Image: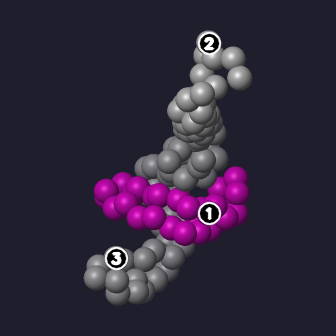
């Protein structure tokens, strides 16, 4: 999650997934969150566990009560590193597998 500076809270009318922390310590996640010039609101789902569907309740806060606003965002650097490592591991596995499949009568030093 990436923190949004207070001056940018209402720059977008809607954000996909937002974690809001208020002055009284309440922390809620809205999917999606909606913004106006002075407030944020969205649907918050309470997890009841055991596979029970979570009922949604609409919750709103004045922006002057919000102390922290975080937005879920894809981290392209981290994603690139993970994909790069996976690609290298895949290539190494293919090369190792090909070396192990060389027929014994065509190994190094043997002339067919």
Residue at x 52%, y 44% (from the top left corner)? 3
Residue 10: give x, y in percent of width and height: 65, 56
* Secondary structure under the numbered disc 1 in the rendered image: loop
- Residue at mark 2 to residue at mark 1: CA–CA distance: 63 Å
Task: Check disc 3 and report its element: helix, strand or loop.
Answer: loop
Compared with 6, 47 (above or below) is below
Which residue in the protein does label 3 denote? 47
- The relative height of residue 53 versus residue 14 in the rendered view (above or below) is below
- From the top left corner, tell me how far across and down residue 12 is, in percent: 70, 57
Label at residue 109 = 2
- Say whether residue 98 is visible: yes
Asked whether residue 85 appears in the rendered view, the answer is no
Query: Residue at image x 46%, y 58%?
Result: 20
User: Residue drawn at (55%, 69%), measured in percent from left and top?
Assistant: 31
| Image quadrant containing the C terminus | top right
Count residues near mark 2 (Cα–Cα under 10 Å), then give few for <14, some for 14-19, many for 20+.
Answer: few
Q: Which residue is mark 1?
A: 16
Frontmost residue, 92 versus 81: 92
């Amino acid at each position: 999650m990436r923190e949004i500076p207070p001056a940018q809270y209402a720059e977008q009318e809607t954000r996909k997934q937002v974690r809001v922390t208020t002055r009284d310590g309440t922390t809620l996640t809205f999917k999606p969150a909606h913004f106006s010039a002075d407030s944020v609101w969205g649907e918050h789902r309470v997890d009841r566990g055991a596979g029970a569907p979570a009922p949604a309740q609409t919750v709103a806060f004045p922006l002057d009560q919000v102390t922290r606003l975080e937005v879920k965002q894809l981290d392209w650097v981290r994603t690139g590193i993970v994909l790069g490592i996976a690609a290298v591991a895949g290539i190494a596995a293919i090369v190792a597998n090909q070396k192990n499949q060389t027929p014994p009568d065509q190994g190094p030093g043997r002339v067919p």
